[in-house]
Amino acid sequence: MGVSYRTGTTDKSPRSGRRRTRRVLGAAAIGAIGAVAVGAAAWVARDLSGAFGASPDEVRARVTSSPQLRGGAFHNREQTRTMLPAAGQSTLRELLFGGQHRKPAGEVPVVAAPAPAAEGLHITWYGHASALLEIGGRRVLLDPVWSDRCSPSSVVGPRRLHPVPVPLSELPELDVILISHDHYDHLDMATVQALVGISSAPFIVPLGVGAHLDRWGVPSERVIELDWDESVEVVDGLRLTATQARHFSGRLITKRNYTLWCSWVIAGTGPDGADRRVFYSGDTGYFDGYPEIGAAYGPFDATLIQTGAYDARWPEIHMTPEEAVQSHLDLRGGVLIPVHWATFVLAFHAWSDPVDRLWREAKARGVNLVVPRPGERVDVDAPPPVDAWWQAIA
């Protein structure tokens, strides 16, 4: 039998000593875990703080007047809701219990594009909304996102479903870098900072987005901000025009619409004097302004249209595949290339649903559709037939 020794209220039995030791060790462990948690939180905060970009006050200092600016924020020309009322519960239910195959079952085929062409019109889609336009001997990079995640954090957030087809350092010499808006899947801090070091191309962005680039160290002389229907010609034979889109902006959940969003018209004149035109939709819901854009700036040899990440709960800010075909027709487009699909899971539909529906609608309406693999270059003057490569891995 064990012997207990008591002096006053202090228990000196071996068992109580073990309990006290466990309490001390437990407190130390809790303290250590707390210290690690605090350190991790500090690391995450540091990781996030830069990626969030400029504050609303920094943005407002750059944006003083615009027909789209009302009450200190940018607005669409038509009433637009980012989410329908009472959508939260159904969204959570779909997230937890939806049965769609949101990721491919097999490996997404990635293609290494050949050397850039000196003439003609070529488009290389790198995945999601990132693409390279070779137009009249000039090269325009659209919404480059080369990070593993489209997120303010490098450890959480939607992760890429296929590798980038080519490292940034192996891109051809660029003439222009175009940004459509400041959401993470279109404007990536790490990619921007890398491009500053390896390219001398200017960044052409919607109003206010330049404040993010300034925060990230992009020289001010390399940033040009445009409002809708404003144009710039930074190199001979290449004209960039910001056009209307129906979307929203912001890199913080509670801070939106301090920066503008847009679509882009890219017009180039080749060595042979031929005019070539491409339309890039950016992110947008369908709206009745597309015929007006087509009449003012078209017809277009090719359109790159947002096709994925749609949902009945946010119908006014992202187009369905059927609306993508309609917008292409409104714009008087030639070849339709779908973007904003395949690379990140950003909605609840099945991974292959965007192009399955788009192909069906394009065939029904006589639209010339091209669905390239990531990294595959399309010669717009000799577009390849659709081969349904995605269906084998869906």
Image: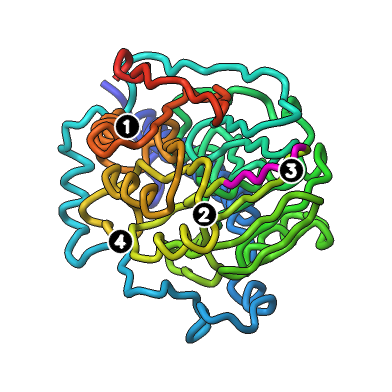
Q: Position of residue 318 (x, y in %)?
A: 34, 53
Q: Is residue 393 found left or right of 57 in the rendered image? A: left
Residue type at tag 1? Val
**Which of pointers 3 and 4 indicates the residue nearer the eye?**
3
- Magenta stretch contains residue 264: no
Q: Do the numbered discs 3 and 4 sit on residues whose CB atoms are within 8 Å?
A: no
**Which of pointers 4 and 2 indicates the residue nearer the eye?**
2
Residue type at tag 3? Gly
Q: Do the numbered discs 1 and 3 sit on residues whose CB atoms are within 8 Å?
A: no
Residue type at tag 2? Gly
Q: Do the numbered discs 4 and 2 sit on residues whose CB atoms are within 8 Å?
A: no
Mark drawn on residue 316: 4
Mark drawn on residue 355: 1
Q: Is residue 241 found left or right of 340 in the rendered image? A: right
**Judging from the image, what secondary structure is the residue with disc 4 in?**
loop
Earlier along the polypeptide chain: callout 4 or callout 2? 2
User: Which residue lies under the disc numbered 3?
Assistant: 273
Would residue 264 be visible to someone looking at this image? yes
**Which of pointers 1 and 3 indicates the residue nearer the eye?**
3
Q: Position of residue 10 (x, y in %)?
A: 40, 46
Earlier along the polypeptide chain: callout 3 or callout 4? 3
Mark drawn on residue 298: 2
Residue at image point 28% right, 47% down: 320
Residue at image point 65% right, 54% down: 50
Q: Do the numbered discs 3 and 2 sit on residues whose CB atoms are within 8 Å?
A: no
Magenta stretch: give its range.
272-277
Q: Quadrant of the N terminus?
A: top left
Give the alpha-carbon distance from disc 1 to disc 3, as whole Å: 35 Å
